[in-house]
Image (cartoon, grey):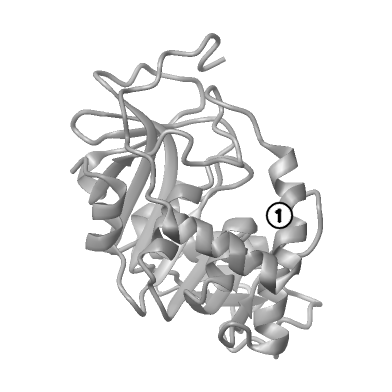
Amino acid sequence: MIVPLDEAVRELVHDGDTVALEGFTHLIPVAAGHEIIRQGLRDLTLVRMTPDIVYDQLIGAGCARKLVFSWGGNPGVGSLHRFRDAVTHGWPVPLEIEEHSHAGMANRYVAGASGLPFAILRGYAGTDLIGNNPNIRTITCPFSGQELAAVPAINPDVTVVHAQRADRDGNVQLWGITGVQKEAALAAERVLVTVEEVVDALDPVPGQVVLPARVLDRVSVAAGGAAPSYAHGYYERDNEAYRAWDAIGRDRGAFTAWLAELTATAPPPAGPAAPEPAGRGL
């Protein structure tokens, strides 16, 4: 259950898979994304509500053939230049895109987690996504006659999320600003969770989400594994790293140098559990 990250990625993620690396604002599974790049995985369909710089990196590394998303950008900075280059110029490989609303993506995950073939919502009315995205249809309510939007469930081959901690049995606990990590995990065929540390017991925390070991496949310790995003109670967001990425991602040469450095560098060892920081869980 608890294995090194490189081993977990090798076991769970394969060429051609549909992969969701979810996290909203914080707890973004950056270390896992970098390991996917290091292992040279290809032809992935990447899914995420809000792809940011780690998806820019995966796309620039040639890992992706398709992106399913609802918003993409370098938050607080601007565009994702590797994403734009792949869409407009096919570099390093062409990228197909499928765009949805936030509500549409969230409901797709919920449908997948619920074992339903599709989700129904009021969203998309008045947008040009209907008619341009074949995975957005309209359906008539059999009770009221109201026209609603229907979108297919998302069932990733692999969902990857980052969390604060796991116990030694592989139960995972996350808290703070959470997105659709729980739904994305429950919708997936296989689940990998990276964590800041492994502890003997999961002390309750207000607003926590607990993913039981029975719905997970592998847990890997990756201290700092959400950086440059933040992990509530462990470290803050590295705003300078997001600003610095704009110049790297904007230039193919700078990006290629960054990629060469990443792929030449082994991930840091898991090491001992991190010390308990002051104020955790508040």
| Most foreground residue, 190 or 101 | 190
Residue at 61%, 79% in the rendered image: 98
**Horizontal and vertical percent position of residue 237:** 66, 35
Q: Nearer the viewer, residue 38 or 199?
A: 38
Residue in view at x 28 percent, y 43 percent: 219
> Where in the figure is residue 1, as x and y percent of width and height?
18, 43
Q: Which residue is mark 1?
A: 245
Kindly tell me whether residue 142 is visible in this rendering.
no
Residue type at the position of mark 1 = Trp
Position of residue 268 relative to residue 235, above or below, is: below
Q: Is residue 3 visible?
A: yes
Residue 135, percent from left and from top: 56, 83
Quarter of the figure that contains the C terminus? top right
In the drawing, does residue 243 fall left or right of residue 155?
Answer: right
143 in relation to 177, above or below: below
Q: Residue at x 61, y 81 (%)?
A: 97
